[in-house]
Image: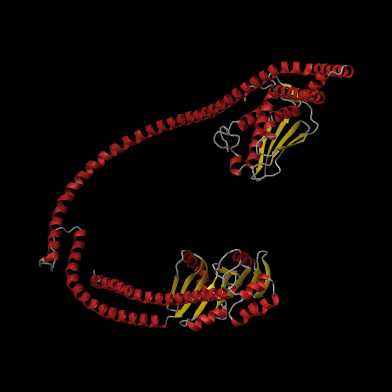
Amino acid sequence: MQSLQPKILVFTFGASLLPVLGFSSVVWQLLEKPLIELEKTRLDDQVLAFRGYTAATEKGLRNLISSYANWTDLYNAVQHPNRAWIKKEVSEQLLFTTDLDIVKVIQSPNEKIIGEAGSNILTLPVVKSKIQDLTKRSKLSQELINTGAQGLILLAGSPISRSDGTGKSSGTLILGQLLDKVWLRQFLNYSQPTTRLEIISLDGEVFVSSNTDGKPDRWEKAYFYSQILPTISQKRSFYHIQPELGLNTIYAPIYSGHQPIAIVKLQIVAKYFQEAKLTLTRLIVLVLSLVVLLSVFIAHLLAKQISHPIVQLAKRSKTLAAGDLSSPIPSVQHGGEIGQLANAYHEMAHSLTTLINNLEQRVAERTQELEVAHHTLEERVQERTVELLHKNQELEIKTEQLRTALHNLKMAESQLIQTEKMSSLGNLVAGIAHEINNPINFIYANLTYINNYIQDLFNLIYRYQQRYSDQEIQLYAQEIELEYLSKDLPRILASMDTGANRIKDIISSLRNFSRHDEAEIKKVNIHEGIDSTLLLLQHRLNPDHDYPVIQVIKEYDDLPLIECYSRQLNQVFMHILVNAIDAIELAQEQIDKKIIIQTKNNQNSVNITIIDNGIGIELKNLTQIFDPFFTTKAVGKGIGLGLTVSYQIIQKHQGNIKVVSQLYRETQVIIELPYLLQNNINPDAH
């Protein structure tokens, strides 16, 4: 407690000084802010002067081009090209007598250049493009252009016409002025003096500077993209007040139309700002010094009045902690808060004596009860823990069983849907093929006889014409165009024969695709199944609408017969080829649309690769394409079962299927099948 008085002194001093410091900080901010705003106003005045000078340059260029473009002599020199006169009286005259950097005279309507002088900036693509744009306009136009490394250029274009305004324009006059160092010096001569003036690109590169170095400082490099450029993009000025360096800076946007295309950087000397800030700092320091001295004196008086009674009370606390509950507090007899605290200590000591006696008795009783409850609780916790372990194991087993059952149910549902769909399709295809086969055989078989009979009839008609020449019969023969009929009817019969053959091929392909009459494992030619599937998809490969024809390239190897369920494999080919056609139709920018089918004979197996140059598959979807009901097609275009069923069919045939894809380039589906199946498989187990 010997250090209590210094602590009270420090506390009192700090408590009185903190409000003073806070008040001083507020005063400093209130006084510094007007100084900063005053500096910003000075900087804004410089920016206004720069923009006014830029506007004056634009106005002067507009007046200059207007006076030359409405000149009858120039109009005649352009209409009847007089290059020498234009060079002497216009190009050289303007360059020598004005600040212009570019002069260009273009003849209409062939846009032929008949006069050109000035800076090599005319060769820049952006300047050429803007000149072409100004040439097409029907009135005087001006634009400020960012040419990159060459800086900013003010371009103006006006149609060339007579002084009286009559006649059609004979061409276009283009004038341009660079905002270079000469232009900056002229501005500095007419405006308030600045320490530094620069024009900067939106990438931070210095176009032109009033200083010789023209390099950005370290602060500007560090904060250009994080602070300066975002402010300029919002069409606002950025201020950088640097009193410690004696410079204050403003970055303001330079507009072309309504969009910033460059930045003007203006710096002024901060001499008056520094002097005002120094005076303000000295005043605040003086006030703080006086306040500190006053706070120390007041804190010393308060510490002396408070510390002595508290020291006596602390000594009594130590005796109370040692077990002495009856001794009074010495030297504390007066009233006030300290006296009330001393009386409270006496009452607390008496209450503690009684409380300790009662507490010792209750603690002993409670300790005995807790020991009994502890033993009982341990036994119940052990029993409950064993029960929870058994139930948790049972729950894990049931959860795994439910997860397996749910997966099997989803797989069975997808298999059942696709199996029923393909079974119905196979029955329908087989029925249609059977029903069409008989009448088409009848038609096909009788076409030969019809052709012979018609030929005999024509021969008979020719003989009648040779032996009997009746005028009425001749007129009728001309009316029905007998000679044309004799030539066209055999062609019609040949077309009918071709159509009948085509229908027979389709029926054969339908029967080959459905294989409805083959319910057992059989050795088949894989190429026949692929060709049958392609024939059924011919309407998709050669559509009548706006889609281009899809070219099918077959690269077949010499394969033996494969032991399999042919109808199931045809189903796999159908799913894969339909997906390939859908992917190719979505790749609208692809011009050469094609599907490549490759087969390769291995020692004990065959590889079938189907490649399309469609839109491809994203890498994140490749691991899910065989999952039931997963599809990347639009709603109503697919249900996500085709590749799932195909995967199950290939697995049941003891083979492998995989998909390799490059997004927006191609997709490869690779199937590997053995020649012979090791064990019989169930044809409907897919």
Examine the image and state in which quarter residue 561 appears: top right
Q: Residue most toward the front?
A: 471
Residue 170 to residue 491: above or below: below
Q: Residue at x 38, y 34 (%)?
A: 382
Instruction: Tell which residue pokes out farthest to the left in this image.
Output: 334
Say whether residue 639 is left or right of residue 77.
left
Q: Residue at x 67, y 34 (%)?
A: 544
Give the number of marks.
Answer: 0
On-image quarter of the N terminus: bottom left
Determine whether, in the image, residue 375 is placed left or right of residue 481: left
Above or below, 251 against 519 in this view is: below
128 or 105: nearer the eye?
Answer: 105
Q: Quadrant of the C terminus?
A: top right
Q: Is residue 645 above or below residue 308?
A: above
Looking at the picture, how far across and down is residue 208, in whole percent?
Answer: 56, 76
The percent position of residue 518, horizontal first and vertical second, equals 70, 19
Quadrant of the rendered image containing residue 434: top right
